[in-house]
Amino acid sequence: MTAFLFQKAWQFVIAFFAITVITFGIMHLAPGEPTDIQTEMNPRVSAQAREHLRRLYGLDQPLYIQYERWLKRFLTLDLGTAFDGQPVTEKIVERIPITAVIELLSLGLILVVAVPIGVLSAIKQHSWFDKVTTLAVFIGFATPSFWLALLLMILFGVHLGWLPISGYQSLDARGLSFGGRLLDWGRHLILPVFISAFGGIAGFSRYIRSKMLEVVRQDYIRTARAKGLKETTVIFKHALRNALIPIITLLGLSIPGLVEGGVIFETIFSIPGMGQLFYQSVVARDYPVVMGMTVIASILTLFGNFVADLAYALVDPKVRLGKEAR
Amino acid sequence: MVLPRVEAETTPIPAPALPSPFWHRFQKNKIALAGGVVVGVMLLVAFLAPLLSPHPPNLIDVHNILAPPSADHPLGTDSLGRDVLSRMFWGARVSLLVGFVSVAIMLAIGVLLGALSGYYGGWVDNLIMRFVDIMLSVPTFFLILAVIAIVGPSLFLIMGIIGVTSWMGVARLVRGEFITLKESDYVTATRALGAGDLRIIFLHILPNALSPVYVSAILRVAGAILTESALSLLGLGVQPPTPSWGNILTEGKDNIEIAWWLSVYPGLAILVTVLGFNLLGEGLRDALDPRLKD
């Protein structure tokens, strides 16, 4: 197990370096300089001031020195300064809560909806329920979530007028009581949470269905049935538990995807989360922010992979003890 | 060295009297056939866009701004009075072009690296597979957005960057096939006849290693179409005035309170096209390997 951990940790470190180098390279090899945005539009900026700015951001140094500096600062959790003068870390941290709330709620929604659907369509394979959900999942896979977002905004926001279509709270939210604010948030967040969960629901229910079908055919399930256990006990205690193990892995792998997905729905619903910050920074070419967020998302992905591998190893002795089965 | 033409001396195999089992299964799978029809219709629409469009796609008509669907404009007009139906016909070109070209790029990279990795093994394999792992950890959508923002959006860049960030699965598939096939008797025989590595890789193993790749290529076309429309929606895709399904949706988002037709129809086109490719891919999977059917 220690050897396995070491191997994975080593791979983690190498991947981290590679990703930061790739991202850093892309950001800095691009034509033009980050400071152009500040200087080009302003005719009063002198060549001296431009040079001063270049030195301020360290752009006059060779690339590898810039990278080394960036890495040193990164290891102390300093991601540099955004072009509006605010530290990048601060900018990102203030966007985390709203994104985290939406992602956690949508993860919960995914599990609450997808597990029962997957289990039901597996134990009633070929029933009408199974056929309907299979069709729904297939259409769900092909549905662009940003389009669904627009449709729901038109239906509930414009035509029925039930829900607000942008932001996460009303303009007068400060004047409301605590309960009122909670309700206000709920009304604003219900569509974003649903849209963010939408693709996951389709994917997870399919995954649980196929896992359940696999597990139900195993010998120990036959044994459980043969010794006269109730069908519900067999399904929920014996089968579902085993079917859920790989799902922990899948959850680990899907977290970074949720953050990336935020770019689209946070932009559509004008929610000031991390996705919107990334989009705004990309459009404004605010490199320190883009670089910082890309690296953070990469680390999240690496960490997700790492946790997934670890969870897998804890469960499956073949992975833990044997050499890599590739 | 000139290779002996072994194949030429064998008796030619007579053409099968029955349809091959592949076609038979494929035709039996009605859903896959439906997917094929949808894809075919979309291709036809893209090719015939100039003939089908009732109006020029970029014809601005200030008297008909944001007009709801009518006899003259079956799917309404946008904020410059341009005909939405015509723009959608032309938009099919962009979507399908991005889908096919980016998948071609993906295949070129994935097949090459997968083949080298599987055939040579050892440190080559190790190097390429670690690179695959690293690419899989890069947040693809972030990277695509960042690169487009730096270089500036263009059709070629979008196709390129989608291809460059999506080849990893194909590389793994091809590698797996190569690892199995390189040990097979016919490859040993070819090597004994003196064939070089390149000949073995590209002429003897590759044709037999591609069947799982077809399926994933078709499914990736759908994925690329979705990515392109998401980029266009964010204003980082194909730039107006060139019509694309995604940038019509942007207009829909900006005019959401007044013009539902700008949101509903382009999204429906994306949905149907993506569904078509998905059904075709899944149907092909079943036809190529009936064991995979659950």
Image: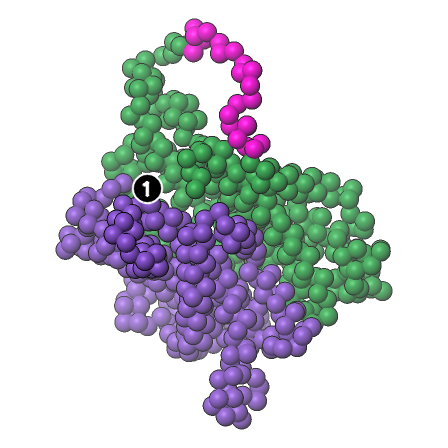
User: Element under label 1?
Assistant: helix
In the rendered image of this protein, which colour is used for chain B? Answer: green
Query: Is residue B40 left or right of B68 when viewed as pictured?
Result: left
The total of numbered circles placed on residues is 1
In the rendered image of this protein, which colour is used for chain A? Answer: purple
A170 or A214: which is nearer to us? Answer: A214
Q: Is residue A193 above or below residue B58?
A: below
B154 or A302: which is nearer to us? Answer: A302
Query: Is residue A307 left or right of A41 when viewed as pictured?
Result: left
Q: Is residue B229 visible?
A: yes
B222 or A301: which is nearer to us? Answer: B222
In this view, the residue farthest toward the left is: A2
Task: Give percent across and percent down for residue A206.
Answer: 44, 52
Q: Which residues are magenta?
A: B7-28
What residue does disc 1 label? B128
Q: Is residue B107 visible?
A: no
Q: Is residue B20 magenta?
A: yes
Instruction: Report the residue at 65% width, 52% height from top.
Output: B269
